[in-house]
Image (tube, rainbow, N blue to C red):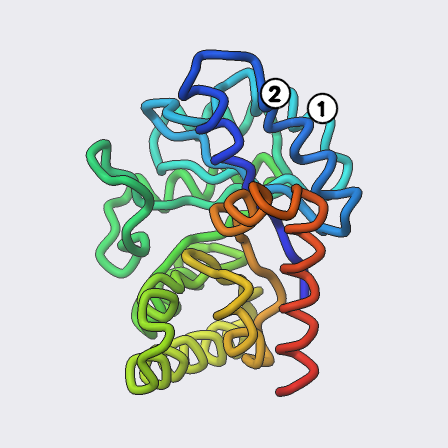
Amino acid sequence: MRLHVNVDHVATLRNARGTTYPDPVEAARMCLEAGAHGITAHLREDRRHIRDDDVERLRATVRSLFNLEMASTDEMIAIACRVRPDVVTLVPERREERTTEGGLEVAKASPSLRAHVDTLRAAKIKVSLFVAPELAQVEASHAIGAEQIELHTGEFAHGHGDEAVEKRELARLQAAAARGRELGLEIAAGHGLTTTNVGALVAIPELVELNIGHAVVADAVFAGLPGAVRAMLAAIDKGRAQR
């Protein structure tokens, strides 16, 4: 199970005061030294946290896997083709949202999404699509040429503690993961995951990667960044051992 730490909210803290610190690139280095397997960053159209210079520096610094999240727009695809991250994860994006609120609409996508996937693949960049755990979205992701899907775990995470909701959402995630793997897709997951809810999720056998950011950065306030990464890795390992 790979853990990719999203460093967006280190940049959020930096930008709140307009300083040069804390540096998301230094945070990425510390996460990798603590055992994370890769780094994720979301370059939003409004640049509310990660900025273009951060992306350039992360690409120059991260020697393990660098996953760049972005909207499916001509501007963002051009940036990806120039910077050449290892993976691009295409996500839905609305200016007014606090964070990504749902999965990408692939089943009813416009032709531009397929064109953007084709452009990224032609540039030898692995394409992942952030989708709801719905069979139609999984199947459409395969049909459009994605190599990986990242399942949106927000409803599962927000339902933690409610046994009925958690059971229902785990079933949806399990079915989506199984169908995706059957189609040959690699299966990742993310959104709202913490050390307290991740254990149940990693029991899904098809799941090979988690993208977690906010909880790690929040835990780092109390435990330090290396400690927060190690705690998340321990929670993942414990969950997998119990499946």
Image mark count = 2
Amino acid at the residue labelled 1: Ala
The part of the image, by quadrant, that contains residue 116 is top left
Left or right for 98, reference 182: left
Q: Secondary structure at mark 1?
A: helix
- Mark on residue 60? 1
User: Residue 169 at x, y = what percent?
Assistant: 34, 77
The C terminus: image quadrant: bottom right
> At 72% across and 45% down in the image, what residue appears?
226
Front residue of 7 and 187:
7
Task: Report if residue 121 is visible in the image.
Answer: no
Residues at discs 2 and 1 in contact (Cβ within 8 Å): yes
Q: Is residue 11 left or right of residue 167?
A: right
Taking the spot 35% from the left edge, 63% from the top edge, the residue there is 140
Pointer 2 residue: 56
What x and y, as percent, mark residue 183? 50, 73
Q: Quadrant of the N terminus?
A: bottom right
Q: Nearer the viewer, residue 134 or 166?
A: 166
